[in-house]
Amino acid sequence: MSAQHIYDTAPLGALIRYSNGEPQPPARFKRKVRAWEHFNGVGRLTQKQPGSAGRHYVLPASITLHVGSYGENGCIVLELSRSFHVGSDLTFTVAELPPVGAARVVTSWQEVDELRHLARDVAAAEAWLREHQYSNARIEVCISDTGEFAPAMGAAA
């Protein structure tokens, strides 16, 4: 699939695999493996940014994947995300959709939604939101195995 297809159809919270189609080099070639990992990986879809145009520029639509969090003892020091424009040459596939009953914490800014957290259920999402306190956050619950979400009833955002 293309990045455009992911942009059009995948829900926020889906696990997306991206690849350039090259086979992974043997582990003994550390630099080649690192270079291969730059173009081949998996991440959680956190944002779909629509394209925009200004007087002197044109930005294509893009998707953003959360590929990792780094830290220790419960303290995250670095969160790594990758953005891909919809015309990317890489191949994208939906590796996993959020399960039915999963709850996502979403914020909006300038009419663009961003996934902040994907929890196993509404209670876990509410607990996470109390601890992290995002303004204008809302909780949505996965209502089907195709990744459809609906606002959580009675969720304290």
Image (cartoon, rainbow, N blue to C red):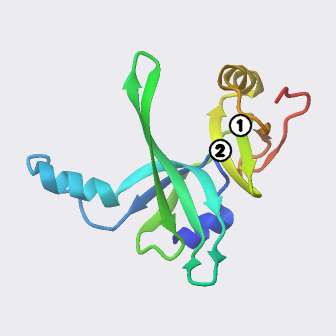
Up-down relation of residue 65 to residue 102 (above or below): below
Taking the spot 76% from the left edge, 21% from the top edge, the residue there is 123
Residue 131 position (above or below residue 50): above
Q: Position of residue 131 (x, y in %)?
A: 66, 20
Q: Which mark is residue 105?
A: 1
Q: Secondary structure at mark 1?
A: strand
The image quadrant of residue 53 is bottom right
Residue 71 seen: yes
Q: Residue furthest bottom?
A: 55
* Kind of residue indicated by mark 2: Leu
In this rendering, the answer to whether 54 lies above or below 10 is below
52 in relation to 134, above or below: below
Image point 67% across, 23% down: which residue? 128
Mark closer to the chain start, 2 or 1: 1
Specify few, some or many for label 1: CA neighbours under 10 Å numbering under 14, 14-19, or 20 or more.
many
Horizontal and vertical percent for residue 46?
60, 49
Residue 122's x, y, as percent? 76, 27
Front residue of 129 and 25: 129
In the image, what residue type sits under mark 1?
A: Val
Query: In this image, 126 relative to 43: left or right?
Result: right
Label count reads 2
* Residue at the extreme right: 154
Decide if residue 114 is on the left or right side of residue 138. Answer: left
Which residue does the image show at 67% across and 64% down from the upper left? 9
Residue under label 2: 115
Q: Quadrant of the C terminus?
A: top right
Q: Answer yes or no: do the residues labelled 2 and 1 have beta carbons within 8 Å? A: yes
